[in-house]
Structure formats: structure tokens, C-alpha cells
Amino acid sequence: MRTAYNLLLFLIIALALSTLFFKKGEGFTASGVTDLKYYTVDSNILCAVSCLCCVLGGDLHWIAVLRFAGTVAVLVTMLVVIFLLTPAFGIKAMYTGRDFVLHLAAPLIAVITFCLCEENIHFEEAAWGAVSVLVYGACYLLNIRKNGIEDNDWYGFAQYGLKQKLLPLKAFWWVEVLLFTLFAFLLSLGLIAIHP
């Protein structure tokens, strides 16, 4: 069953991601390769790759850790969309077409199949679940430093909080990156704790 579930999740995400090249999403305006700037896309790619590795690579422990990291990444996406983006942009913008798959369906399937089919990860490996958030945050901010804020701060992190005032916290960008990384780490611990 593990192989079948991972193959199914890979195909669902791959199909949703393939639409990036054919039509725009409802919530944000980028399309094609420029969609790679969004954590939603990156987290779903990580999850899809981890599922494909599970299908092709068998029961190696590093593959289980990769699948865990991919699951936490899409879980972060889902929770940020539910609690931050949906209140700011509305349900239609966040859950129409491929956005429904990338923001809700794939993350839920990833968590359920991880808990039912994958080997449990040790608590000392929980940090792997937060790596995608830390790397994304660092790349986001390095891009702004190199290319300027004007067209590169699409979330508004470098301008004391999100542009749409999604976060009540008005902190420096590095605090936000650290808080999101801590959030991902806590989700990692929670996912390990609920795994049977």
C-alpha cells in the first residue's frame, strides 16, 4: 500500500503543478517558472519528489526522512493558507482549481499517508522538517538583498510584516524567518508524536 499511496500522491501533485504552465492560479498572479518563488509550489515539489523516491527507492531511512520533510513542508503550506492567507484573500482565491490541491488536498493526503504508511522518524531528526522553511526564508531574503525590495518582496517580509497585514507581529525579517522555522520545527515534533 505504501508504494501505491506515494505514487498516487506524486501523480496528484504533479498534475496540479503541471497546470502552472497552462493557466494562472486565483490567489497570486505569477505563472510558469515564476511560480517557483512561492513556498506553496516549492513545498509541493519537495513532497512530490519525496513520494517518487519512496516509490523508486524502497525502505531506505534517508528516504523516510525526506518523505517526512516533504510532509512537514506541505503541512506548513496548508496551515499558513488556512490561518493567514485565506482570511486576507478569501476562500475562492486560496481553494480554486489547483490551489485546492496544493493548499489543502495534497497536504492532508501527505499527512494521512505518512502516519499510516511511513516509518516513524526519531525526535532527534525533527529538525529536517524545518529545513525547507529555513532555506526558503534565507533564499527569499538573499534575493531581496541582491535584487532589491521593489519587485522581490512579494510577501512583504522585509517591510516589517506582510503587506496585507496578515501577521499581527511587526518585526524585522529575520525574526519572521526564525518564527516560521520554529513553527515548522514544532509541527515536525507534533507529526512525530502523532505517528502511530
Image (cartoon, rainbow, N blue to C red):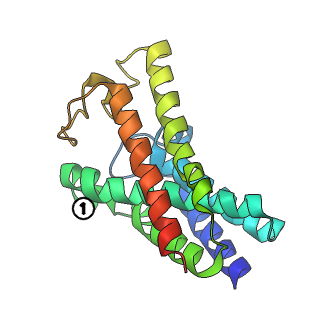
Does the image show residue 2? yes
Q: Position of residue 23 (x, y in %)?
A: 46, 51
Classify residue 54 by image quadrant. bottom right
Image quarter in which the N terminus is found: bottom right
At horizontal 39% and vertical 60% (from top left) the residue drawn is 78
Q: Amino acid at mark 1?
A: Ile
Q: Residue furthest bottom?
A: 1
Q: Position of residue 196 (x, y in %)?
A: 55, 81
- SS for tag 1? helix
* Closer-to-camera residue (93/64): 64
Q: Position of residue 111 (x, y in %)?
A: 51, 71
At horizontal 55% and vertical 76% (from top left) the residue drawn is 115
Quick check: 169 above or below 10?
A: above
At horizontal 47% and vertical 74% (from top left) the residue drawn is 194
* Disc 1: which residue: 91
Dot 1 alpha-carbon crowd within 10 angstroms: few under 14, some 14 to 19, many 20 or more: some
